[in-house]
Amino acid sequence: MGALMTLLVAFKALGRNKMRTALTMLGMIIGVAAVIAMVALGTGAQAAIEEQIRGAGTNMVTLFPGAMSFGGVNMGGGTGRLQPPDADALRLLPEVTYVSEIVESRQQVIAAGANWSTNIVGVNVDYQDIKSWPTLYGVFISENDVRTVARVCVLGINVSDNLFGPGLDPTGEHIRIRNQLFRVIGVMTAKGASSGGRNQDDQVFAPYTTVLKKLQGRDWLNHILLSTESDDRVDAMAQAIRAEMRFRHELPDDAEDSFRVQTQQDMIAARTAQTETMTTLLAGIAGVSLVVGGIGIMNIMLVSVTERTREIGLRLAIGARGSDVLRQFLIEAVAISLVGGAFGIAAGYGIAEFLEVYLQSPALIPADAIVTAVGFSGAVGVFFGFYPARKAASLDPIEALRFE
């Protein structure tokens, strides 16, 4: 029997009991749809994390003091502090384009009879270029403001709206932080959440010298932000920063770093590692339903062999080969799997779209996920359909014709 005729016979056999065939496909549909939806959500979350981190700054590297552990891995030893002279030294490196000292403090801000608890961030003039963050009203901090320890500030849009009202320009107004009066010189445009999940619009920016001397009374920094001209220079900049800091902190060759240099790629890797693990786990759980669907196919095909024993015996008696019978039943099993897989992919797209709207989380379906789903569906059909097909092909024609 030719391949086309075998295919037609197989589909005709499946069409005899449409309800049973549809229910058999249901396991594949649910399994493939679940896998597609989970992979879509995981891939979308990873893409959102990367976009969020890249949007936090331009070719940025962050220098932290001391050490930090992540996932049980020591990221460097020591407790050395970062001070303004460290930032001044890093400005001289040819690999570095912009540098900003960062000092942070949580404070209560009072203005116009309103008060708001927010993060006070001491920065330098390069901060705006590093973050690629324009002002909505007014201007950003100037070099003169930093040099003269001026009591001026720039508000995040969220702080401005809560203190002075939505849509109002508060430049020229004053706010009180602790016992110090600051003049508002600008408001930043909306930025959204940072890579760490912090609301960047809920901040007040002031000269780092002012925050150190007027609000903190200390001489050390929380961290230092640096950036370079292009992406391909980030690694070179990170290596130059590390070498310079080891020299400044007089660390022996065999000593661990007393600081931590973190690139945007480091942040992306750390954030997406957890997402990838969760996506793999959820896809694995969803994949169990594919196996259950395959077992359902095997069960139905075994029932079909029993029901069609006389038909198989007749075909064998009039000259059909065992390989023809084997091929027919394999085609039936694979057809159920592939058609179910196709419906499952469509359902997976629909579920992903629904979850994207319902959860307000991006969902992206990579092309390789579709190819994998189709391939796995076919493989399930072959794997779980082979035994029933082999059993049908091995029937004795005489015994099969006598079967009631």
Image (cartoon, rainbow, N blue to C red):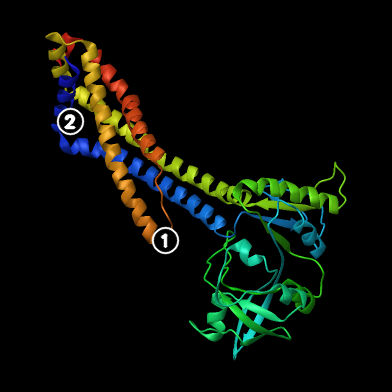
Q: Residue at x 14, y 28 (%)?
A: 12
Q: Quadrant of the N terminus?
A: top left
Q: Which residue is mark 2?
A: 14
| Position in image of residue 185 (x %, y %) | 62, 81
Q: CA distance from mark 2 to mark 1?
A: 41 Å
Is residue 334 depicted above or below 265 in this figure?
above
Q: Quadrant of the C terminus?
A: top left
Q: Nearer the viewer, residue 329 or 266?
A: 266
Q: Nearer the viewer, residue 128 or 10?
A: 128
Q: Secondary structure at mark 1?
A: loop
Instruction: Answer left or right for 181 relative to 310.
Output: right
| Amino acid type, mark 1 | Gln
Q: Is residue 68 visible?
A: no
Asked if the residue under mark 1 is in contact with the one under mark 2, i.e. CB atoms within 8 Å, the reply is no
Q: Residue at x 24, y 18 (%)?
A: 327
| Position in image of residue 138 (x %, y %) | 58, 79
Instruction: Answer left or right for 16 relative to 169.
Output: left
Q: Residue at x 58, y 65 (%)?
A: 198
Disc 1 residue crowd, few under 14, some 14–19, many 20+, Cα 10 Å: few
| Amino acid type, mark 2 | Leu
Instruction: Answer left or right for 89 relative to 106.
Output: right
